[in-house]
Image: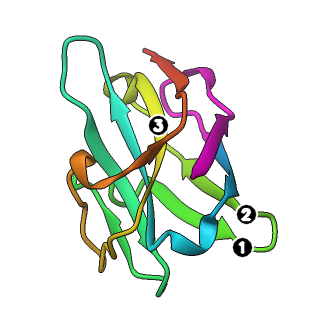
Amino acid sequence: QVQLVESGGGSVQAGGSLRLSCGASGYIASIACMGWFRQAPGKEREGVATIDAYGSIGYAHSVKGRVTISEDNAKKTLYLQMNSLKPEDTAMYYCAASRIYCGGGLLPAANFAYWGQGTQVTVSS
């Protein structure tokens, strides 16, 4: 089992920045890919960014150039730095872990076995 706990969400004005963190614990050695997803009210959960065990990174088209995914293996923590935030970035953000390599792509949510509880990001105009 793998446990994930997100933090760092909040309310910001458009153009602002936030850094989300996701602490991982448990049988992390089994994890091949970690990612960030988001879900806005009334919308489906969508992938934002992924990073796999080889360091391959993928971003959603809607956030490319504005967000950076990174990880600190020593701290067992995944990060999502978000800059130039827009109101359409408002959503619940989830950290997820998969046993499948992402290879620089955005795997569907169904491929991620472990999920955090989510952290809310609200961007006002």
Question: What is the secondary structure assignment of the residue under circle 1?
Answer: loop
Q: Position of residue 75 (x, y in %)?
A: 80, 64
Quick one: SS at disc 3? strand
Q: Which residue is mark 1?
A: 73
**Image x and y of residue 5, in percent:** 66, 38
Give neighbour class at mark 2: few <14, some 14-19, many 20+ (Cα, 10 Å). Answer: few
Q: Amino acid at mark 1?
A: Asn
The numbered disc on residue 76 is: 2
Mark 1 and mark 2 residues within 8 Å of each other at the beta carbon: yes
Secondary structure beneath disc 2? loop
For residue 94, the mark is 3
Q: Residue at x 60, y 74 (%)?
A: 29
How many residues crowd around disc 3 within 10 Å: few (fewer than 14), some, or many (20 or more)?
A: many
Q: Was residue 8 drawn as part of the magenta stretch in this picture?
A: yes
Main secondary structure found in the magenta portion:
strand
Q: Which residues are magenta?
A: 1-19
Residue 62 percent across, percent down from the top left: 25, 47
Q: Would you say residue 11 sits in the magenta stretch? A: yes
- Quick check: marks 2 and 3 in contact, CB under 8 Å? no
Badges 3 and 1: C-beta atoms under 8 Å apart? no
Q: Would you say 28 lies left or right of 83 here?
A: right
- Residue 40 visible in the displayed image: yes
